[in-house]
């Protein structure tokens, strides 16, 4: 009995080893390396494919690339500007090809009118967003800069309140954590990296914020760390006054934009009145003059 079990187990092991060997040989004979294989792991290690960047015109430094780099940094979006610009241009190209193909199919008769109307928003929305991305990014950057400016004003007011205190600058900044919201994550990283290297922590902090307010705040904190004196606090008050002036200027700009919008909205009823009540009279007058002509 034991001999039979031993022979059965030995046969099963030999069969499995043979099956694995045959499968390995067949896979080695039929396997082909994918030609267009792109994975996110390879992108993190090696970066995006160079042929894609060159085809999109993002292989070298350009004014558009520098502009997107500043906009993305100001928006707090940590994406490689070359990848962003190449993806934007590729999306515009794909939308243009899709629009041309849909129009051709509609002309030939492969697509009905209803199908074409359904395809319009699918193609138009990404194309419009990609085309006007600069305006959208700039609007979000100004909104984020205004919020960061307000939070830094609160932090600097608190630092001025601690003037003359024996607390270390790191301790003062720790007590200012509750006044931050948008920059809380970056502010926490600044405080965590402070004792490793304060200068590098401030440098990384202003790079993460990517705004002029972050740069001036980081430089003021560097001066305060090196020598905390009345001159440094005077400079802090000057920066604070500059931030407040920037807030007032932004408010004035928003009021001006709102006044233009209200002016346009106020003109709509006038236009509607002309179209409903006056335009039919103008048409009737024109018909009357044509009849009275000799």
Image (cartoon, grey):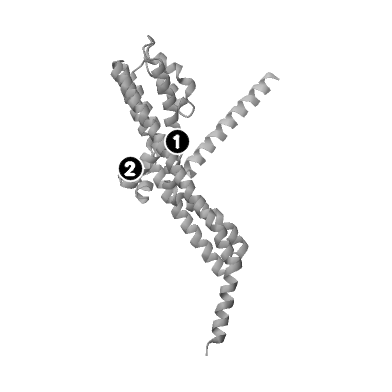
Query: What element does badge 2 sit on?
Result: helix
Residue at 36% x, 26% y is 217
Q: Residues within 10 Å of mark 1 (few under 14, many from 20)?
A: some
Mark sitting earlier along the chain (2/1) = 2
Residue 122 is at least partly visible in this image: yes
> Dot 2, crowdedness within 10 Å: few (<14), some or many (≥20)?
few
Q: Residue furthest top?
A: 166
Q: Residue at x 45, y 50 (%)?
A: 130
Which quarter of the figure is the N terminus placed in?
A: top right
Q: Does residue 104 sit above or below 206 in this rendering?
A: below
Q: Residue at x 53, y 87 (%)?
A: 293
In percent of width and height, residue 54 lies at: 34, 48
What is the secondary structure assignment of the residue under circle 1? Answer: helix
Residue 197 rendering spot, x and y as whole percentages:
33, 18
Nearest to viewer (mark 2 / mark 1): 1
Name the residue tied to disc 1. Answer: 144
Q: Nearer the viewer, residue 150 or 175?
A: 150
Q: In this image, 282 relative to 33: left or right?
A: right
Q: Are marks 2 and 1 in contact (CB under 8 Å)?
A: no
Using the rendered image of the protein, determine whether residue 203 is visible from the camera's viewpoint.
no
Is 168 rendered above or below residue 21?
above
> Is 21 or 126 nearer to us in this picture?
126
User: Disc 2 marks which residue?
Assistant: 66
Looking at the image, residue 141 sits to the left or right of residue 222; the answer is right
Q: Quadrant of residue 189?
A: top left
Residue 173 at what x, y percent from top left? 41, 18
Relative to 79, residue 55 above or below: below
Number of numbered discs overlaid on the protein picture: 2
- Which residue reaches farthest right? 1
Residue 159, horizontal then vertical, whole percent: 40, 19
């Amino acid at each position: 009995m034991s001999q039979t079990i031993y022979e059965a187990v030995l046969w099963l092991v030999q069969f499995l080893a043979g099956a694995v060997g045959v499968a390995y040989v067949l896979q080695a004979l039929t396997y082909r390396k994918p030609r267009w294989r792109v994975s996110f792991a390879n992108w993190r290690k090696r970066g995006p494919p160079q042929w894609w960047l060159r085809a999109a015109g993002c292989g070298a430094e350009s004014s558009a690339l520098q502009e997107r780099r500043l906009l993305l940094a100001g928006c707090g979006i940590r994406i490689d500007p070359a990848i962003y610009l190449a993806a934007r241009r590729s999306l515009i190209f794909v939308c243009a090809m899709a629009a041309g193909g849909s129009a051709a199919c509609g002309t030939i008769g492969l697509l009905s009118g209803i199908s074409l109307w359904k395809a319009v928003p699918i193609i138009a929305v990404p194309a419009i967003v990609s085309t006007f991305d600069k305006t959208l990014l700039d609007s979000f950057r100004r909104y984020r800069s205004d919020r960061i400016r307000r939070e830094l004003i609160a932090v600097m007011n608190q630092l001025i309140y601690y003037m003359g205190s024996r607390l270390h600058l790191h301790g003062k900044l720790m007590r200012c954590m509750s006044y931050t919201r948008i920059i809380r994550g970056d502010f926490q990283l600044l405080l965590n990296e402070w004792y490793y290297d304060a200068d590098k922590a401030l440098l990384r902090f202003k790079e993460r914020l990517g705004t002029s307010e972050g740069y001036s705040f980081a430089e003021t904190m560097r001066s305060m760390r090196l020598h905390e004196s009345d001159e440094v606090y005077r400079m802090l008050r000057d920066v604070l006054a500059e931030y407040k002036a920037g807030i007032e200027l932004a408010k004035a700009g928003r009021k001006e934009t709102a006044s233009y919008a209200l002016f346009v909205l106020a003109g709509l009823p006038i236009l509607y009145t002309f179209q409903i009540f006056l335009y039919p009279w103008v048409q009737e007058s024109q018909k009357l003059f044509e009849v009275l002509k000799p």
